[in-house]
Image (tube, helix red, strand yellow):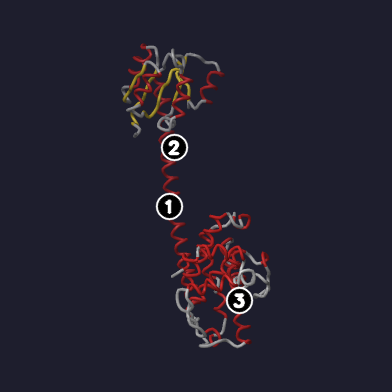
Amino acid sequence: MEIDNKLIMLVDDNLANLKIGNNILEEKYTVATASSAAKMFKLLENNTPALILLDIDMPEMNGFEAIKILKSKPETKNIPVIFLTAKTESDNELEGLSLGAIDYITKPFNPALLLKHIEVHLLVEAQRKELQCFNENLQKMVEEKTQDILELHNILLKVIAELVECRDNVTGGHIERTQKGVRILLEELEKNGVYQEETKNWDANLLLQSCQLHDVGKISIDDNILKKPGKLSNEEFEEMKKHTVFGEQVIERIETLTKESNFLIYAKIFAASHHEKWDGTGYPRGLKGNDIPLLGRIMAIADVYDALISVRPYKEALTHEEAVRIIVEGSGTQFDPTLVELFVENSERFKL
């Protein structure tokens, strides 16, 4: 219900006070009068005043009881309330202010003072609403701009990852497919409550963006190796393995130029550890078991699955069933057994 900025509600059980107050206010405002709290609440069902002048000493329900109800309801809690009282005790005023009243006006009314009190409080309320509206609009603008920046951020990451991918003689779409695999495993970790301690502070959106850079280190690998139309020699493979360290170094250089933290931390872990193996025979550091970062263990499954089902210069694409079998056979040697179980349970989701 919209607030009537000209409507003042005057509530007093003394009919003479209602008449006097109405006569003072009606020159500047629309006035609704009520001789009891019950009648006030009835009027509020169809009217939302800019301000309520509420008498304290009334039979059946006094002003203190009435304001408690006003402040408890979403539709009336923001209506400013000024108490009317013939009393001047400070304790009485303190109680009313603590219940949410914005001011006190004593009776009998001083016309000029009554109007000035109302004028000032309506001005303050109008400024409060204007500031609230400004803040809401500003917050909306910030959120929209932040979203634009995040979208640009993600697009740039995707372009960088695709540029790296284009240098390799690998079937296109590797970035999207590995990202899909990581997403599936992340969802299943959360769903099954697996590795909760490691994952409790993870930001899934940042993780899925950052995993696009897991092969960024290939940008430093010589074209003769990266694009070789056949199986690599031992020496060439040793050089290729360095893409994990190169990727880590590239991201570390970016870290020195930006205040971004979690995203780059995630990206660096993906780049450096996705070729480590559960039994310690992987590279670049030969980490073993749970010493391998969980992000690296997740990417290892997504990366190998995609490599198996994709054409390579030295092999044909395997079927989905063959790829699943190979990953299962690598459980406990190449891959984290717990993650392999989640992969098998959801392997159909990995299909193209």
Residue 67 drawn at (x, y percent): 46, 24
Q: Give whichever of 10, 196 is nearer the camera.
A: 196
The N terminus: image quadrant: top left
Whether residue 331 is situated above or below residue 13 in the rendered picture: below
Residue under numbered circle 3: 246
Residue 157 drawn at (x, y percent): 49, 68
Disc 2 and disc 1 in contact, CB within 8 angstroms:
no
> What kind of element bears circle 3?
helix
Residue under numbered circle 2: 128
Residue at 47% in and 70% down: 177
Mark 3–mark 2 Cα distance, whole angstroms, equals: 55 Å
Whether residue 263 is situated above or below residue 140 in the rendered picture: below
Q: In the picture provided, is 23 more to the left or to the right than 201?
A: left
Q: Earlier in the sequence, mark 3 or mark 1?
A: 1
Task: Answer few, some or many: residues within 10 Å of disc 3's Cα (few below 14, many 20 plus, some between 14 and 19).
Answer: many
Residue at 44% in and 57% down: 145
Residue type at tag 2? Arg
> What kind of element bears circle 2?
helix
Q: Give whichever of 289, 250 is nearer the camera.
A: 289
Whether residue 114 is situated above or below residue 74 in the rendered picture: above
Residue type at tag 3? Phe
Residue 7 drawn at (x, y percent): 34, 27
The C terminus: image quadrant: bottom left
> What kind of element bears circle 1?
helix
Q: Give whichever of 104, 167 is nearer the camera.
A: 167
Residue under numbered circle 1: 141
Task: Answer few, some or many: residues within 10 Å of disc 1's Cα (few below 14, many 20 plus, some between 14 and 19).
Answer: few
| Dot in front, 3 or 2 | 3
Mark 2–mark 1 Cα distance, whole angstroms, equals: 20 Å
Task: Answer few, some or many: residues within 10 Å of disc 2's Cα (few below 14, many 20 plus, some between 14 and 19).
Answer: few
Q: Give whichever of 118, 321 is nearer the camera.
A: 321
Whether residue 59 is situated above or below residue 118 in the rendered picture: above
